[in-house]
Amino acid sequence: MGTEKPTGKDAETLPPLNALRHFEAAARLGSFAAAASDLHVTHWAVGKQIRLLEDWFGVPLFERRPRGVVPTDEGAALLNDVKGAFGRLSSSVTRLRHESITRRITGVVRVNAPASFALCWLIPRLADFQVRYPDIDVRLSTTSRKLRYVGDAFDVGVRSGPEDAAGLTSTTLMPDLRLPACSPAVLSSHPIRAVADLRNHTLLHSTSTRTAWSDWLREAGAPGLQGAHHLDFDHVFLQLGAAAEGLGVTLASLPLIEREIATGRLVCPISEPASRGPDYTLVVNTDRGDDDAVIAFKKWITAAAQNSVEAVRSKPTLRTKRSRR
């Protein structure tokens, strides 16, 4: 078996790479014979590569014993570095092979989600999906109707809470944690240091979350609290947009305001209690569950949701203060 010969400056600093491969196998397995079997070469070939490597370094790398070999101190130090380098190389190869495979998946995925989830969470992340799966077309539609009434006009859906119906499979995507949120400018005139301070602010509502504030205030120990004013909106994304523009304080789903928190457009002045709404749920049309493009989208959105959960939990704005009731 021939050996690779690095060229240029690498030839001056790197030992023969094929010899390193034989060295790692012999050190890992404790004998030249076992290394030969592992590499599908002869015992003589392994011995030749080890001698080549020892000549290159100018030191013995193994102690030859009747029942095998044991690395010398120099060999043990080299083995530690070689294992680390081979491990990093293996990870890189695995990643590149995965990317190569994903780029070959083609198809169409029809995704249905509520408008606020689509606008605030999904669309900002779709560019990443397109980079990973450039040959999969995503067709996004929005509605809050039960997916059982949408029929077969979707492959993957996102909803609040599970949907149990024939032809549908539901799995939890991520928790819906909710806290008061507002623009930093809102706090300049009337700081919010405790739940009671909300009485000095305009509270923002949306049609689909009309009871959210009362539920949260009850959990926070202030069931009778009223804001100074109230503003109502048809959609959650309008409610969140109004909060970012400084119109008042909203009770926000943390996954939906992750970007606004990261950029500082919104802050959560009270860090608890973080009430929990129905979990965001991934609903799959079982007739399309085995499609490669659908499987790819499911894996991608599940990983993205996990990253979102970790990002929300790591935000210091959610841990700075304890509310005083």
Image: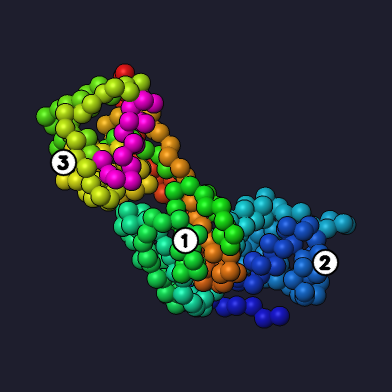
The amino acid sitting under disc 2 is Ala
| Number of the label disc, if any, that sits on residue 33 | 2
At label 2, counting other C-alpha atoms closer than 10 Å, the crowd grade (few under 14, some 14-19, many 20 or more) is some
Asked if residue 208 lies in the magenta stretch, the reply is yes
Please state which of the two labelled residues, at mark 3 or mark 1, is closer to the viewer: 1
User: In the rendering, at what x and y percent does residue 154 appear?
Assistant: 47, 67
Judge whether 301 appears above or below 263 on screen.
below
Task: Decide which of tag 3 and tag 1 comes sooner along the chain.
Answer: 1
User: In the rendering, at what x and y percent does residue 52 appear?
Assistant: 67, 70
Taking 208 as reference, is 80 left or right? right
Taking 203 as reference, is 73 left or right? right
Residue drawn at the location 44% of the way across and 53% of the way down: 159
User: Which range of residues does the magenta coloring cover?
Assistant: 205-220
* Residue under numbered circle 1: 149
Taking 206 as reference, is 285 left or right? right
Label 2 sits on a secondary structure element that is helix
